[in-house]
Amino acid sequence: MRETKNQVKTLATAIPRPFLKWVGGKARLLPEISKYYPTSHGTFYEPFVGGGAMYFSLKPKSAHINDLNLVLISAYKHIRDRLKPLIGSLQELELRYYSLPSLEEKKLFFLEQRETFNSLPNDSFEKTVLLIFLNKTCFNGMYRENSKGGFNVPFGKHEKPKICDEINLKRVSVSLQNTTITHSSYEEAVSTAKKNDFVYFDPPYHPLNPTSSFTSYQAGGFSEQDQVKLRDEFKRLSNIGCKVMLSNSDSPLINELYKEFNIRKIYAARSINSVGTKRGKILEVLITNY
Ligand SMILES: C[S@@+](CC[C@H](N)C(=O)[O-])C[C@H]1O[C@@H](n2cnc3c(N)ncnc32)[C@H](O)[C@@H]1O
């Protein structure tokens, strides 16, 4: 796994893609959102990092990423610090999966790995390996926990998914080297932000209607009161001179909470609903203080 000088150079400049598919992932919205990035800034903060689409595309010189999900944050740390054994374990799993002759056998293997995943400590290295394996082999490549915090997405029926994307994992690892990675609530994560730093908030969205499931992908969720507290944090950061950007749903509450800031409507092609006809474009908002 030793790289030539040229490969090292390419690794350092190449833009990584998110290594996981994550509900609420911003990849498809980036062309729209990137028009509103500040022209210059200090450290980049992404306290609800999820799959990290924005963080990876921005490739900031200095960054702090954070999430309340320990399984996810441990995966970022293991990719940064233990890339070689991680790639080895994923390659092994990929070989075993490909060698199974029928989808029925692949499904049994998937279910076995899912059970092991749920029995492992959230910060373990083995759990990161299985998180990536399950994300590539489950239905829709989603991460979803049930009320007891277990991963319960069904088998995806993929014959030969790419389980170990070695090149991308290397790029991810390289870009994480100069990044602070924490597992805490968003308030704590941004407590060190200073004047001119750029903070991007992508919280669980305020639901557009009571049946909307946008906030239920992680045990816990985010209440109306939490949205108000987040707005207060947005204001605090704004007052100390940070450049602050936030995504949320286009609901009356969010429009009211941020009315003193710049609110832009953004069209998002969401495929969160598995019923084909309900897919399509919905409006969300992008708020900035600059
Ligand atoms: C909408 S997702 C972020 C999506 C991400 N921007 C992407 O592109 O994939 C929201 C994230 O916030 C995390 N989260 C929920 N409540 C939190 C809190 N109080 N503090 C920090 N993170 C939280 C969830 O675990 C989830 O990963």
Image (cartoon, grey):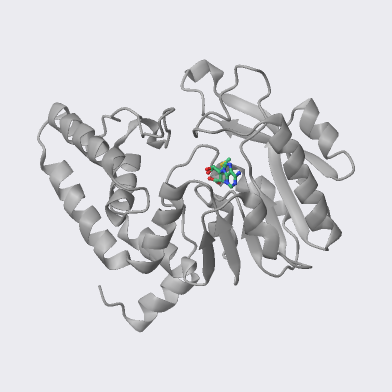
Q: Return the x and y of residue 283 as percentages of the image width and height.
A: 70, 30
Q: Which quarter is ligand 1 in?
A: top right
Res. 288 visible in picture: no
Q: Is residue 106 left or right of residue 30?
A: left
**Image mark count:** 0
Q: Residue at x 60, y 21 (%)?
A: 212
Q: Return the x and y of residue 62 as percentages of the image width and height.
A: 60, 71
What quarter of the picture does the C terminus occupy?
bottom right
Q: Return the x and y of residue 69 as percentages of the image width and height.
A: 48, 46
Q: Is residue 143 left or right of residue 262?
A: left
Quadrant of residue 264 within the rendered picture: top right
**Nearest to the observer: residue 278 or residue 108:** 108
Q: Is residue 267 above or below residue 20?
A: above
Quadrant of residue 7 within the rendered picture: bottom left
Res. 74 visible in picture: yes
**Nearest to the observer: residue 189 or residue 162:** 189
What quarter of the picture does the N terminus occupy?
bottom left
Q: Residue at x 26, y 36 (%)?
A: 114
Q: Is residue 204 above or below residue 146?
A: below
Q: Residue at x 54, y 23 (%)?
A: 279
Q: Return the x and y of residue 185 as percentages of the image width and height.
A: 60, 49
List the single residue furthest toward the bottom: 5
Q: Residue at x 41, y 52 (%)?
A: 19
**Nearest to the observer: residue 204 or residue 171:** 204
